[in-house]
Image (cartoon, rainbow, N blue to C red):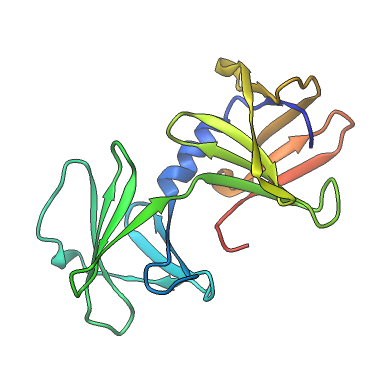
């Protein structure tokens, strides 16, 4: 897709559903230079961990009895790795500057930054090219970019936001998007020529 108008009245709802269901966080170069660490929190209680060089998810063990306090600006988690007694405490800040603050067993503090809600489609317009749709939760904006140039993100312009209407700057071509898959895990895009394209929910391991 190049320049297009998005018709999707339920896209905002889809994004909110996925935000509530899955939140992704990233921390670079903390344990080792060149290694990126990821955390996924599902339904506000299940925590998963992986890294850029070990992409298999590890389900961390919840230790709710180790949470000794409550906060008003986010959520608290206490977890451990499987077969380990070391406790990692997370403070998920959900107001203001969203972050996940991790206190290690040795007292070190690590900051994880939030990742956006992203959907992707591979090899549709051109073999070897992946297209992305990204939703920014803070200012309710949408961006389009491709694997060919991930730094060139194009902000969609709302032309009828109450109806979910957007377009690329200067674009007139109309596309229709709708929810697809379980819990809105995919976006269905109907092109003007009748072709159907699916954008899958991106889990930051591709």
Q: Depth check: give the residue in front, 101 or 6.
A: 101
Name, please, the residue furthest toward the bottom: 83
Residue drawn at point x = 9 percent, y = 60 percent = 68
Could you say which quadrant of the image residue 87 lies in? bottom left
**Quadrant of the drawing holding the C terminus:** bottom right
Rendered position, 90 above or below 15: below
**Quadrant of the drawing holding the N terminus:** top right
Q: Depth check: give the residue in front, 141 or 150.
A: 150
Compared across the picture, whether 145 is left or right of 78 comes to right
Rendered position, 153 above or below 61: above
Q: Position of residue 160 (x, y in %)?
A: 61, 14
Compared across the picture, whether 160 is left or right of 127 comes to left
Residue drawn at point x = 52 percent, y = 74 percent = 56
Could you say which quadrant of the image residue 163 lies in? top right
Q: Depth check: give the residue in front, 98 or 196.
A: 98
Could you say which quadrant of the image residue 80 lies in? bottom left
Residue drawn at point x = 19 percent, y = 75 percent = 106
Q: Position of residue 66 (x, y in %)?
A: 15, 67
Name, please, the residue furthest toward the left: 68
Rendered position, 101 above or below 94: below
Q: Position of residue 152 (x, y in %)?
A: 67, 41
């Amino acid at each position: 897709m190049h320049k297009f108008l998005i018709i999707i009245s339920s896209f905002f709802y889809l994004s909110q559903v996925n935000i509530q269901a899955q939140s992704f966080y990233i921390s670079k170069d903390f344990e080792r230079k060149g290694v990126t660490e990821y955390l996924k929190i599902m339904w506000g209680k299940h925590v998963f961990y992986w890294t850029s060089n070990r992409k298999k998810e590890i389900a961390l063990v919840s230790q709710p009895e180790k949470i000794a306090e409550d906060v008003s600006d986010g959520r608290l988690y206490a977890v451990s790795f499987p077969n380990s007694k070391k406790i990692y405490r997370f403070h998920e800040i959900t107001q203001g500057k969203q972050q996940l603050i991790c206190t290690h067993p040795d007292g070190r503090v690590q900051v994880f930054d939030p990742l956006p809600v992203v959907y992707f489609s591979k090899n549709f317009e051109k073999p070897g090219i992946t297209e992305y749709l990204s939703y920014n939760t803070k200012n309710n904006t949408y961006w389009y970019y491709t694997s060919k140039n991930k730094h060139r993100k194009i902000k969609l312009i709302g032309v009828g936001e109450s109806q979910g209407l957007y377009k690329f700057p200067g674009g007139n071509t109309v596309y229709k998007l709708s929810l697809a898959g379980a819990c809105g895990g995919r976006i269905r895009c109907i092109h003007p020529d009748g072709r159907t394209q699916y954008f899958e929910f991106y889990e930051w391991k591709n």
